[in-house]
Image (spheres, rainbow, N blue to C red):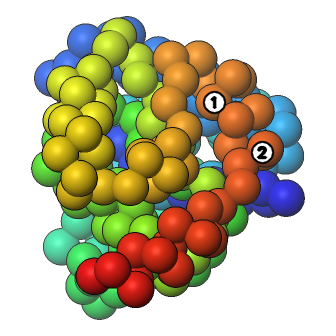
Amino acid sequence: MLKSICVFCGSSDAVNEEYKQAAFETGALLARRGIQIIFGGGKTGLMGALADGALTAGGEVVGVIVPAMNTSALAHAALTRLEVAPSMRERKARMRELADGFIALPGGFGTWDELFEVVTNGQIGEHDKPIGLLDVNNFYAPLLCAIDRAVADGFIFAEHRRALSVESDSTRLLELMKNYRHPHEATQRWMRES
């Protein structure tokens, strides 16, 4: 059961409003479903829109932030709870620990780092939690092409590729994630073949 979802997303304000709107709607949807949001604790960009959407809908939002970002200019002041982790590594570990699943919205290097870390953790069997990509405005299409090329060229098992749920609509993405079944056999095979 998905009681909490960690959402990775961009913090830049200099992005198309379509992305911020999708983040706001995703936050509101999760709140209406009674799903607690775990995120990076920021108030700018998609991060802020996500939190605002959830809080507006009466949801619980837990931020995990590092000291350098825990400033009035960057940290969201109205969260249910804000935790301060000593480093980025510990921040990511804490977010993973609190979450029953993960969603990546559009973002940059930080978002991709968080996404690929949880994908890799799942691939090697460190967790069996669902991972989803909210593909707003085909943002992730080039990345998905690269991943599919890696599957075709033998770098990624097809089962691990299918473990990454992709949708452009957050309601449909959430349904895919609720029905997720981790490819344990592929993980065991990958560990034997590595």
Residue 141 against residue 41 in the figure, above or below: above
Say whether marks 1 and 2 touch (CB < 8 Å): no
Q: Residues within 10 Å of mark 1 (few under 14, many from 20)?
A: some
Judge from the rendering whether residue 149 lies leftward or rightward of residue 103; answer left or right: left
Residue toward you, 41 or 185: 185
Q: Which amino acid does label 1 sit on?
A: Leu
The N terminus: image quadrant: bottom right
**What amino acid type should be assigned to the residue bearing mark 2?**
Lys
Q: Based on the displayed image, in which of its 4 quarters is residue 160 positioned?
A: bottom left
Quadrant of the image containing the C terminus: bottom left
Label 2 belongs to which residue? 178
| Label number found at residue 62 | none
Query: Between residues 53 and 183, which one lies in front from this camera angle?
Result: 183
Question: Which residue is painted at 30% across and 55% down in the image?
Answer: 156
Question: Based on the displayed image, in which of its 4 quarters is residue 184 positioned?
Answer: bottom right
Q: Which of 79 and 18 is in front in this view?
A: 18
Is 16 situated left or right of 29 in this image?
left
Report, in whole angstroms, how far the alpha carbon at label 1 lies from the one at label 2: 9 Å
Q: Which residue is drawn at 28% across and 45% down?
A: 151
Residue 33 vertical placement versus 98 (above, below): above
Query: Which residue is found at the position 78% from the left and 55% from the top?
Result: 2
Numbered-mark total: 2
Q: Earlier in the sequence, mark 1 or mark 2?
A: 1
- Whether residue 27 sits left or right of residue 83 in the image: it is right
Q: Where is residue 92 in the image (x, y as percent from the top left)?
A: 37, 74
The residue wearing badge 1 is 173
Instruction: Give the structural element (helix, strand or loop) at label 1.
Output: helix
Is 110 positioned to the left or the right of 58 in the image?
left
- Report crowding for label 2: few under 14, some 14 to 19, many 20 or more residues within 10 A (C-alpha): few
